[in-house]
Image (cartoon, rainbow, N blue to C red):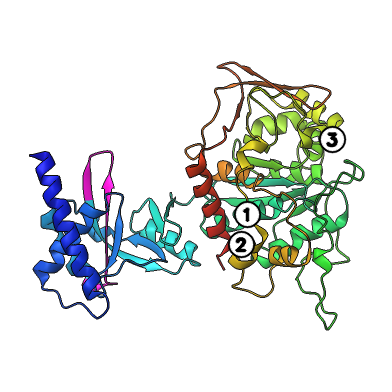
Amino acid sequence: MKKLFLTLAAILAISVSATITATAQSKPNLTDKELYNAVWAMGQMYPDGFTLDINTMRQPTEGIVVSYAATQNSFDRKSIPNVVKHAREHNGFVGGWLNPENGKYYFDSNRIFPEDSLAAAVQFARENGQHTVYIASKGINLWTNYEQKDIRIILDTDLGSSTDDLFALMMLYRYMDMKRCNLIGIIVDRMDRANADIADIMNNFYGYPNIPIGLETSGIPNPHVFISYHNLPYARSTKAEPMFKRTVGDTGTYPEAYKLYRKLLAESPDKSVTIASIGFVTSLSRLLQSGPDEYSNLTGVDLVRQKVSALYAMGGVFGDAVEPDYNFKAAIDFSLKFFELWPKDVDIVFSPGEVGDPLDYRPETVISDMNWTDLHPIKWTYQFLNCDTGQKMWDPQAVINAVEGDALYKLSPRGFVTLTPNGETIFKQDEHGNCRFQYPGDPVWCDLVLKYIRTMAIQH
């Protein structure tokens, strides 16, 4: 009987699909019963979910779909009239989805936001008790969670070389827009004021001009530069006017990086700070070696132990390969001291390069996704510099993991990581260890995460 029922359901779905196709060319004129049957049939046709405009009988191809709380417990055929009634009184969209946990197929009245209005869509989702929103053009669901402003993030970045740092920073601003975290400071661990000025224009462009920036002054002299965009803050228009606004400007100063670390940590509640490290560990090493000062009477090690909940670090080479990690080897003396001093009771999650390797955000796609504005610091970089250098989305993985948590990533068992003088990361499994690392995802996962980054890039 089950097989026969499914066959009949499929026939009904095909019949209704033909009706929808035939009427889509003009405004449909369905009776209520026909419309209810069509919605039910859509559920049979699309077990993974659907959204339907009941005024045109078309499925929208773009937009952010969010369900109303008023219809969220509608999970049988008898509930469809009430769902359709609510949709008619509101936005005219009906959707459905299968809950794999209980096997029930739910129907909802939906609202659709423009795809560049993710923050508004997430806010509406929270107001209606919805845990996800659906991005129609990309076919992905995004978790909305609830407000996580208590997650305090410090980004430690080597801005001025690889452009994935820019996207990682962009992700944090968009998380701030959605009240998913609070970016309390940016540490620029690549020396040269110009690199801190990049953070300054990014703060201003994304609407957070007062996020403090610390600059490393005693780190690695002249590290390798892959894509030189350090002139970005000083770009001028044809009228010789600055293209991008800065808060610190030409005459202001940036605090020493490790001193800003100490200030931010001292001002934070215990175990409230998450650090996302996507560059060298020069400033972190200097923090750990620091002593009591005007901000705290604790040593750097004790300050980290008391205030930091976890560190998410882009770096490390694990598995069968034994080879140096670029970030750690480039600053080997600082890196060795960092691994020696980092408290063994504060977690580290490493994001190896192979996790981001398949995430190829092509230059032409970046420019297209940011065509909503003529003037954008990341777009400018891609328009006027050669960014087609094998640049992949490595750095955002540490940031996404730091904010989203572990559900999106497959992580190794716990263990301890030691660093060799050649910059090799040696992992030894131990259930009491403070270290884990991300495993690379399959093609479906990679496609989802790249679409997530692109969704953030189109926001404005």
Give, as a single range, the part of the protein colored magenta: 88-105
Q: Tell whether label 2 touches label 1 (CB within 8 Å).
A: yes
Residue 230 falls in which quadrant of the image?
A: bottom right
Residue for badge 3: 331
Is 34 on the left or on the right of 294, as rendered? left
Which of discs 3 and 1 lies nearer the camera? The answer is 1
The image shows residue 54 at horizontal and vertical percentages of: 24, 70
Q: Earlier in the sequence, mark 2 or mark 3?
A: 3
**Mark 3: amino acid:** Ala
User: Disc 3 or 1, which lies upstream in sequence?
Assistant: 3
Looking at the rendered structure, the secondary structure element under dot 1 is: loop
Give the CA separation, mark 2 to mark 3: 33 Å
Q: Name the amino acid type tagged 2.
A: Thr
Left-right relation of 60 to 181: left
For label 1, the residue is 361
Mark 2, secondary structure of its residue:
helix
